[in-house]
Every structure is written in C-alpha cells, then in structure tokens.
Image (cartoon, rainbow, N blue to C red):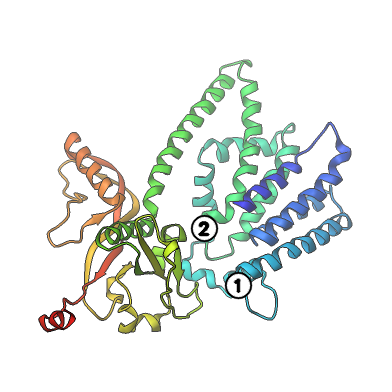
Amino acid sequence: MFAFGLKTLAFSILLPNPLNPKSTPRRQRLSITTLVFAAVIFRSEVALLLFTTVLHQLLQPTLSLSRAIRPFTISILAALTISLPIDTYFWQHRGPLPLWPELTGFLYNVIHGGASAWGTAPWHWYFTSALPRLLLNPATPLLLLPLALTHPALRRAARPLTLPTTLFIAIYSCQPHKETRFILYAAPPLTAAAALAAAHLFRRRTGKGLVPALLAAGLLLSVVASWAASSAMLAVSALNYPGGEALAYVRGVAGGGTGGGAVVPVHADVLACMTGVTLFGTGTRTGSGAGSGKGSGIVKVKQQDQGQDGVRIVVDKTEDDAVLASADFWSRFDYVLVEDRSKVVGGEWETVGVVKGYGGIEVVKRGSGRGDDRTEKGAPRVVGLGETVALWKRTVRDLTGGWWIGPRMVERIFILRRVKEAPTTQAVVEAN
C-alpha cells in the first residue's frame, strides 16, 4: 500500500495541465522519481509500471530518453542509499553485501520461479477475473473506458492513464503466479479515465432526445449497484482468513486453560500462514521462511512480552517436508493448525475444531438436503465465522422453506491439540 500511494501520486502528476504546459518536463521528472522510489524501496513490480509509463511517454512523444535518464539515475541512487542500510539492519542480514529486499524477492519469485509454489493461474486471469473485480462497475470496461479512449475531447487525458497501465498488466500476466494485489495499482488510473467519460455523459443528460437522460440514469444506478456489490464482497472477504480464525480460537482456549505467563507452542502450515496467521495474533514467530527449507525451534519469551490474557502464542511455520516427516518435530507443539491432518505424525492428537472458509456461492433449493451444514455425529466442531454462517443458513432456510443463496463454506484449517499422557499413580506419589 505504500507503493500504491506513491504510484497513484506519480500518475496524478502526469495528468495534463493546460494552464501551465511549461511545467510538463518538471512533472515528468517528478513522476519518474516517485515511481523509482516505490519500486526500489517498497515493491519491485512497480519497476515494470515505470517501464511502460516511460515507454508511452517516449512514443507519444512527450519525453526524450536523455531527459529521462538523469532523474532515473539520481533517484535510484538515492532510493538505494535509503533502502540498503535500513533494510539490512532490520532484516538482520549477515551476508557480505548489503541486503536489497526487493531485488532478492524478485530473483526468488520471478527469476527462480519460487512464487509458483504458491499457486498459478491462466495467463488471462488478470483481465478476466482480477480486473473486473477491481473495477466492479460493468459500465467501466463496457462503456466508459472505450468512450474515454476514443472521444476527441477525452483521449488526450485518458490514454496516458490507461495505455501504460494495460500494458503493465499484459506483461505481468506472463508471470504464472497471480494475485489481485499485484495489479492493484491499475484501479485508480483506469477509474479516473472512466470518470472522464462518466462526467462527459452526465453533463449532456439534458441534451436532445431520451438517450442522454437514460445514459445518465444508468450511470447513477450502476454506481449504487456497485456500492451494494462491493459491500457484499467486503462481508464475504471476511471468510477468507481461516488461519487467523484458527489462531484466535487457540488463543481463547489456551488462555482459559492455562495459568498466567504460559507459552503455548503452535505449528501453522502454509495455508494457515497465507490466511491470517500473522505477528499481530502471535507476537513471536519462529521457523523457516518461504522456501528456505530450514528447521525451527521454539524461542523463550520475556514475561513483559506476554499478551493481556497472560498467554504467549509462539508459532512455528516450518515448510521443509523432511522436517515435517519426523515425529520428534511434532512432539514439541501443543496445537497445530493444518489443512491436511495426515501430515501430523507421532503422538496422540485430538481434533478440537475446524475452521471453514469461503468456497464460492451456492444455491440450495427447497427440499434439497444439500448444504444443511448441521454438524454430523463425530465430526469436529466448526468454529469461527463458519459457525455463524451455518447459523444464518439454517435460519434463512427455516424462514424460506428451504431456500438459501449465499456463501458455500468448505473445511480449510483443522485445529489439533496434543493429548498429553496423564501421570501414573507412582509418578504422582514420587512428585509429592
């Protein structure tokens, strides 16, 4: 989001200023500098957006290559001067060379293909799935952007916003691993270009004939519909963090069953870490980083670092399959948060709960037993928001005679608690 703000500022600087055309070279230099800082310090993919933006300026042509080199060189040196010492210190890097995190991440994720381990998507996914959800209003891609790009009065301002952004998404689509957050930078410029066309149509709503008035009314209705849809998506998005819900449940259970100052060791698998297990819920994290293949240990925590409930959750996030295959590894934990229970080997474990996550929209018809969501006998208890959704689902089906249209919840994270052996009578006598 830091890069998002800088990138949005950079594009706003490039907007035409008819009142002061002589300021264009200065604004171009400032825009390049802002994008360089965003790429070097915060997010490496912004470098690709910098490339497409400068390329568009060179082809217009409103910018010469010689005029772009100087601000680029100065700003990248300044950004590295900031990034290298600060990041090397806070990442506790001990290598012979300073650490540049964005370059390290780029080499690992893109050059070495490490990001693909987190999932891949078709080449068109950004255009067919991510971008429509970002823009949301169907009038934007179907009507407003085409009008903004072709209308003589609008295209001069719209094209610098849309063309570099679209080219950025097209090139970035070559990367197999895709996430909506990687193209979040596209939303403001594309929305701004669409707003140019929307304002143009709305100003002409009182023109001759019925069509201008209908278009203006349709635009207003589309805004209201988009607001309603985004509100619904916001509510549904809360169902995408089963890892965080599982960790919150463990904290509640451990906090109620242990004394003050207790340290509770927990292992979280990849899915749990991707869906809400963060330092905000734990305070301490140990184990290997993504793809590093190292083992892990549990660290001791100072008394003053304890949470308000007197319990300190210490999370291990080891991913190495060889380490995970050892029964000794699992014996050090009180709880584990896993997608696949069969990977937990050795010892006796009790499944104390399962957290369900969003699995799409389902339609359950009257008289259909599918999607009842009542817990079967012997099944683990559903905890977190999945339990709330199940309650709402039963209530709605009772009121509608069996109909339900809403989120389909599927099992995501199982919460396992190690069953500790009770002390023998002899051991109790010896202890006393």
Given residues 400 and 426, the one toward you in this image is 426
Res 15 quadrant in image: top right
Give the percent coordinates (x, y) of residue 124.
53, 57
User: How much space separates mark 1 and mark 2, taking CA atoms?
Assistant: 28 Å
* Quarter occupied by the C terminus: bottom left
Q: Is residue 432 left or right of residue 318?
A: left
Q: Residue 59's spot in the image, x, y percent?
A: 80, 52
Of circles 1 and 2, which is in front? 1
Say above or below: 284 vs 325.
above
Quarter location, residue 187: top right
Which of the two residues, 270 or 420, is positioned nearer the viewer here?
420
Residue 179's tag is: 2
- Left or right: where 119 falls relative to 215: left
Q: Amino acid at mark 2?
A: Glu
The residue that appears at 44% across and 78% down in the rendered structure is: 296
Q: Residue at x 64, y 32 (%)?
A: 197
| Pointer 1 or 2: first along the chain | 1
Instruction: Give how far across and how far down residue 136 sits, in percent.
Output: 50, 41
Number of numbered discs on residues:
2
Task: Mark 2: give few (<14), some (14-19) or many (20+) Cα within 10 Å.
Answer: some
Label 1 crowd bin: few (<14), some (14–19), many (20+), radius 10 Å? few
SS for callout 1 = loop
Residue placed farthest to the front in the image? 432
The foreground one among 207 and 241 is 241
Which numbered tag is attached to residue 343? none
Which of the numbered marks, if any, corresponds to residue 92? 1
Callout 2 secondary element = loop
Residue drawn at (86%, 58%) of the image: 70
